[in-house]
Image (cartoon, coloured by chain):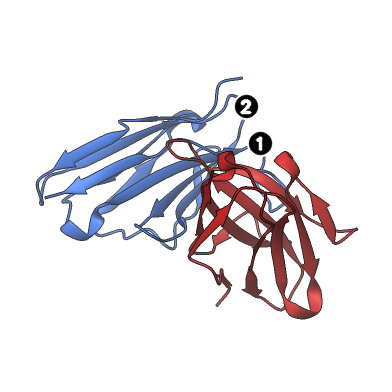
Chain colours: A red, B blue
Amino acid sequence: AQSVSQHNHHVILSEAASLELGCNYSYGGTVNLFWYVQYPGQHLQLLLKYFSGDPLVKGIKGFEAEFIKSKFSFNLRKPSVQWSDTAEYFCAVTPSSNTGKLIFGQGTTLQVKP
Amino acid sequence: EAGVVQSPRYKIIEKKQPVAFWCNPISGHNTLYWYLQNLGQGPELLIRYENEEAVDDSQLPKDRFSAERLKGVDSTLKIQPAELGDSAVYLCASSKLAGGYNEQFFGPGTRLTVL
């Protein structure tokens, strides 16, 4: 069965520190990859997505993610976090042939200390 | 553009009681999804509609859960009777079309507590 694994459940960083959140998926075929973010009290919103092409994708608010096909990974990065990045981050996958069923990881809670 | 609307935002009920959640998707979005999010977990798909047709309900516990999307616009998810283990956040999402290339937009969710 397809699954998504996020290695870090809870991450605490100071402002200006660099961030990398791990995401691995299990699926042998072509996939579409997403990172969603949920700020406190808000709904899930799309941070960035990868369908094809350049494996390094840039999203909103300075976030980027790199797709490494050989490692089945799609790690999220940001060079310098801000207090406002405190949120829960979800990696999600859908097979490209699928009709849109998103498979989410369990999420990573990021706490940024001012 | 208005986002996905869900109501109620919070619901507390006794076990064995029925409960219903309502979702209004973004105007023009043909595909509607209901997800279940347990505490500390990512959302899991319960059911997906394309217009008024439920095209993927394989994860919906049909003994107590039901859903409908009359006229292919808003949708209702019902639980009858509710159990303690149903306490969770129920998320509704919509996309313009079906398929993994279409961004899903999520509503704020309904947080259900079953006592």
Residue at image x 85%, y 62%? A55
The residue positioned 60% from the left and 59% from the top of the image is A91
Residue placed furthest toward the right: A53
Kind of residue indicated by mark 1: Lys
- Figure check: A28 above or below B66: below
Task: Please state the horizontal and vertical placement of residue A3, each as a whole percent of the image.
Answer: 56, 72
Dot 1: chain letter:
B
**Residue at numbered disc 2:** B28
The residue drawn where x is 29% and y is 52% is: B65
Q: Earlier in the sequence, mark 2 or mark 1?
A: 2
x then y, percent, for residue B69: 43, 36
Frontmost residue, A88 versus B61: A88
> In the drawing, does residue A46 fall left or right of residue B110?
right
In the structure shown, which secondary structural element does the residue marked by tag 2 occupy? loop
Q: Quadrant of the N terminus of chain B?
A: top right
In the image, taking residue B37 as reference, residue A23 lies left or right, namely right
Q: Chain of mark 2?
A: B
Give above or below for A101 relative to A7: above
SS for tag 1?
loop
